[in-house]
Amino acid sequence: MDALVLNGVTKRFGERTAVDALSFAVKPGEIFGFLGGNGAGKTTSLRMVLDIVRPTAGRISVLGCPPGRENAADLGFMPEERGLYRGMSAIDTVTYFGRLKGMSAVAARAKGHALLDRFGLAASAKMQIDKLSKGMAQKVQLAATLVNGPKLLLLDEPFSGLDPVNQGLLEHEILEAARGGATVVFSTHVMQHAERLCDRLLLLSQGRKVFEGTQAEARGRLPARLTIVARDTPMRCPGVERAEPGAVDAQGWSDYDVTLAEGIDPADVLQCLTEQGVTLRRFDQYRVSLHDVFLHLVGPPPAGLADPAMAEHAA
Amino acid sequence: MTHNILLVAMREFRQITGMRSFWLTLLILPLALAVGPIASRLTQSEKTQRVMLIDADGRAAAAIRARLDTDYQRRVLTALSRYAQRYGLDRADPGALWAQHDRLFGDADVATFAKAGGLPAALAAMRPATTSETPKFDAPEADFVVLPTPPAIARAAPGALDAQLKPLLRPGEFGDKTAKPLDYAVYVPRGFGVQTADVRLWSSEQPGANFVQPLQTVLTQDLRTAYLESTGLARDQARTATSLVPAIAVSTPAPGGGRERMLVRSVVPLLSAYILLMSLLLSGNWILQGLVEERSNKLIETVLACISPDELLYGKLAGTVAVGLTMVLVWGLCATGAAVATQGAVGAFLHVALAPLASPWIILVMLYFFLAGYLMVSMILLAIGAMSDSMRDAQSYLTPVLLVIAMPFTVVAQGVLSNSGATAIKVLTWIPIYTPFTMLARLGSGVSTMEIVGSGVLLAVFIGIEFVLLARVFRASLLNAGQKPNLAALARLMQRTPA
């Protein structure tokens, strides 16, 4: 049984379609990346999974059940915009959310203490949230998400606003949760996290799915590129679509920017060149990043709507 | 569902009662009520006025002094009679003057009272009938005290009296800031009643009827006696003729009865209406703060992932009502403490004041309207909180709402106490947002069962509709940050069941 299934799910707000006929399935124990720019429909999709908003059309199955608070005991959710009750202590906060997810007070408190201890907050467990640093409060938030040992972890832009230490902690916790058998679905528009964590990913653009698959499959969507330094053109090898020569030095060596046809393995080109006796001084394979795939599939953000995170990444 | 509602309610309750401002605000009301009478007593000026009598013959001064004393003793006797009647002390001496409550006491009665030993003797006679619950008799303060006339003033020529009396009437103007001013000075010329010289009265301010009237009575009696004597009537006969007064039988409600009784019986219901209003005004801010914090801290989404908006709403309502009832409980404990500490008069007052609560039906009615009022207004406040991103936003909605709710309260309280404006108050009773306050306020003065049930049902229907409509606003607004709906948008939210 899949941990999460969306089947033809559409959500409209008035005239605007936020999510358009979205279908995908996440297997148990999988880390699933939900990628897309701002306004792509990621948060709305997660809210529908949590039954915070209802789909206009389509069907959702969460751990084999329809969306609803009945699933709360098995779910862990961290929203993009986070906050805590400022007047509550760290341990009371974690216990409160544990109890809202159906835990007993004793179990929630015990698990809360264990998590805070693991996150280095044992000494601050009884401190009020407004007395904690932002980084410490972020850890409390994470503890509140994990307190019930969720089977399905839904994280909406979990890395946004986290300091590097807490980003590392969160990555570790995501991997730990998956190792423990939990399914993790997280949305992000920062591709490095997805590259490091995701088993599979889904790309969303303007509410529509534009890709679903593994990272290798995603990269396969872009033709491979090579940088070659040789005296002869590599155009004679099959699969080489384009080879732009650069400046030629005194010994006749030239830089070639080579573009391969889709599905061509660079190793085959190397073999071909060797067999043809082409002497090489350099053979660099340019590894396609998810960012490139994203730009290739989704296109650059419209002018004026540039995503700072993407811009930063691109830079 | 109940589990989650209780969890939210408990958190809400703990958050509000954990605030220092909650307890400070909560204790302000009993403190103000306790400090008020003490401050009023401290700032109250002395009631006894100071009088100086300048009488060349000495005859009129004695008569004025006697009159003032007789009037004061009459007040003491009247107060004593009411005291005996209120606390059932007549049985100690049914024949005593103070055991007669059906007539105005004349001069002869006062003379008899004085002759029998006055107040000390009367209190001693009552003692066997008193119990530990009987409060101490608080004798009325004397209206006037007659000061001895300084020899210089007594000997001064009439023309020099103005200059002599000014420093006594207005000592502040003459550099003596500590001296108590003289309130009245009366000059009775030599040969008054025989010759036609004017009596003169100096007063530190506009003379009061309570002094001028007895003065006129004494001097008129003196003039008439002199006149009758001049016509050949014997002195004793002339005196008797001028002091004749009619005997007046009086029928009044017993102390604590009639209008006084109605007023006292209205105290607890009125107070409960006032407490409902106060607790709503005070807790309104805390209710909003909680919800605005959840919205501005982006907590709502995390909470809504675990519980439904309805559970959040009902939990908040339950927590809010618990806070309100805690406030009422604390105030009730303060009142009980005050009653125990003061006992006596307060106890007797409470006995009458709590009489309307003797019936379980009335207790039920009060509880119903109190809780209904709390729910009705709290629901409005929660809808406001759900629409507001900040306390500033919330205040802009809250102020007009609370003004509309609180404004007619003064009219209702005055109307109930003065038994006037009955039609206006009856109309307000049937307007649901005013029903709890008006009905609570009116319970002491008697409301028909028909009216209680009718307005109660109407209120329940109103709250039901309010719950359906405002719950829609609440649900739809929870995640709508940055959108401040106008009236049209609000109406649309009420019509729509959120997806």
Image (cartoon, rainbow, N blue to C red):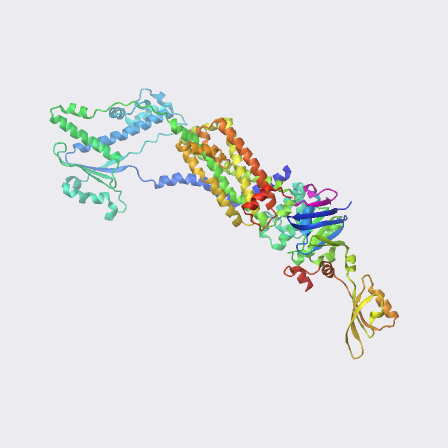
Q: Is residue B170 left or right of residue B437?
A: left
Give how far across and how far down residue B227 sits, in percent.
13, 28
Q: Residue at x 20, y 25 (%)?
A: B243
Q: Give the residues drawn in magenta, as a range.
A: A52-72
**Where in the figure is residue B89, as x and y percent of width and height?**
36, 23
Residue A243 appears in the figure: yes
Query: The N terminus of chain B is located in which quarter?
Result: top right
On the question of residue B441 being in view, the answer is no
- The x, y position of residue A254, in whole percent, is 79, 74
Image: B137 above or below B162: above
Q: On the picture, is A140 further left or further right than B31?
A: right
Q: How many marks can you see?
A: 0
Q: What x and y, as percent, mark residue A314?
A: 69, 63
B76 in the magenta segment: no
Decide if residue A72 is on the left or right side of residue A128.
right
Name the outermost residue toward the right.
A275
Classify residue A265 as left or right of residue B413. right
